[in-house]
């Protein structure tokens, strides 16, 4: 019984509390900031008509829910998270949003994760959100999963990024970015990348193109 309680605290209560506190802190912080949004209308058009994947670097993840809630709240988003303590926390944050969904996968089950990603994209039940250099890095180095999914589905991959005029970089492997109060946040939804000629595009070529797009 005690073990069950401890497991519930570790797996459910602790992530919920951290997510709630963190979300409240970020909302207050972002109220002080000035926003500049670029390309969101183009993204909404693509997401309405096409199979879609949203892609951003892992260290930009902190603002992703707030950006999507602000710019495109009408869609449902599915984020892939790992079976880990960090994954439990990310899941709690994602599920605190009405439009947020998670797909939990093991670090060792890469083929299963890719299969599930392809299925979600093909079904168009939600927009897949992926950090192609996560969950452990190296930072700013795209892994093959998103390229393989894009090739398999001909999905439109929309790179998204943001910068802040003043920010903190945390002491994590990805140097997680957090904007400072009263900064200007510039969000950019970039032009979608789509591989229509799948037969002549190799996985390495797709990875390179996606890498350059971010």
Image: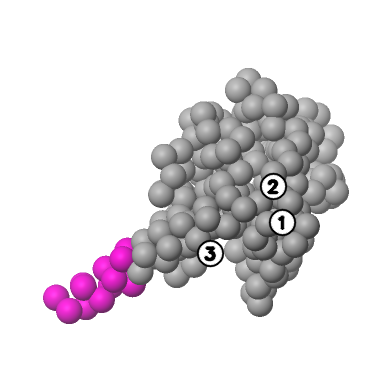
Q: Nearer the viewer, residue 191 or 104?
A: 191
Badges 3 and 2: C-beta atoms under 8 Å apart? no
Is-magenta flag for residue 6?
A: yes
Q: Is residue 180 left or right of residue 92?
A: right
Question: Within 10 angstroms of label 2, few (less than 14), some, or many (20 or more) residues?
Answer: some
Residue 153 on the magenta span: no
Q: Earlier in the sequence, mark 1 or mark 3?
A: 3
CA distance separating discs 2 and 1: 6 Å
- Image disc number at residue 107: 3
User: Which residue corresponds to the image point at 75% horizontal and 47% vertical from the top-left?
Assistant: 186
The answer to whether residue 176 is visible is: yes
Which stretch did the figure color magenta?
A: 1-13
Where is residue 206? Give x, y as percent. Answer: 80, 44
Foreground pick, 184 / 105 = 184
Nearest to the observer: residue 19 or residue 33: 33
Give residue 183's mark. 1
Q: Secondary structure at mark 3?
A: loop
State whether residue 82 is above or below residue 38.
Answer: below
Instruction: State how many labels appear.
Output: 3
The mark closer to the camera, 3 or 2, is: 2
Horizontal and vertical percent position of residue 214? 79, 49
**For the residue labelled by badge 1, is the local secondary structure a helix, a strand or a loop?**
loop
For label 2, the residue is: 34
Tell me whether the residue at label 2 lies in contact with that at label 1, contact meaning CB atoms closer than 8 angstroms: yes
Q: Earlier in the sequence, mark 3 or mark 2?
A: 2
Q: Secondary structure at mark 2?
A: strand
C-beta proximity under 8 Å, tags 1 and 3:
no
Image position, residue 16 (x, y; %) = 36, 61
Q: How is the image coloured?
A: one colour
Coordinates of residue 160 in the picture (x, y in percent): 71, 44
Mark 3 and mark 2: Cα distance apart in space: 38 Å
């Amino acid at each position: 019984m005690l073990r069950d309680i401890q497991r519930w605290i570790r797996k459910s209560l602790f992530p919920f509390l951290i997510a709630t506190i963190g979300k409240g802190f970020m909302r207050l912080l972002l109220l002080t900031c000035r926003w500049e949004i670029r390309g969101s209308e183009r993204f909404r058009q693509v997401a309405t008509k096409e199979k879609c994947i949203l892609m951003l670097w892992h260290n930009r993840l902190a603002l992703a829910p707030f950006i999507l809630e602000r710019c495109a709240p009408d869609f449902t988003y599915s984020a892939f998270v790992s079976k880990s303590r960090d994954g439990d926390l990310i899941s709690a944050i994602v599920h605190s949003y009405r439009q947020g969904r998670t797909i939990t996968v093991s670090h060792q089950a890469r083929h299963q994760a890719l299969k599930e990603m392809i299925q979600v994209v093909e079904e168009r039940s939600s927009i897949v959100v992926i950090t192609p250099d996560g969950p452990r890095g190296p930072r700013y180095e795209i892994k093959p999963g998103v390229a393989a999914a894009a090739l398999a589905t001909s999905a439109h991959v929309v790179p998204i990024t943001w910068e802040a005029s003043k920010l903190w970089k945390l002491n994590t492997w990805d140097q997680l970015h957090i904007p400072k109060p009263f900064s200007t946040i510039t969000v950019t939804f970039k032009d979608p990348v789509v591989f229509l000629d799948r037969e002549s595009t190799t996985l390495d070529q797709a990875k390179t193109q996606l890498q350059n797009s971010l």
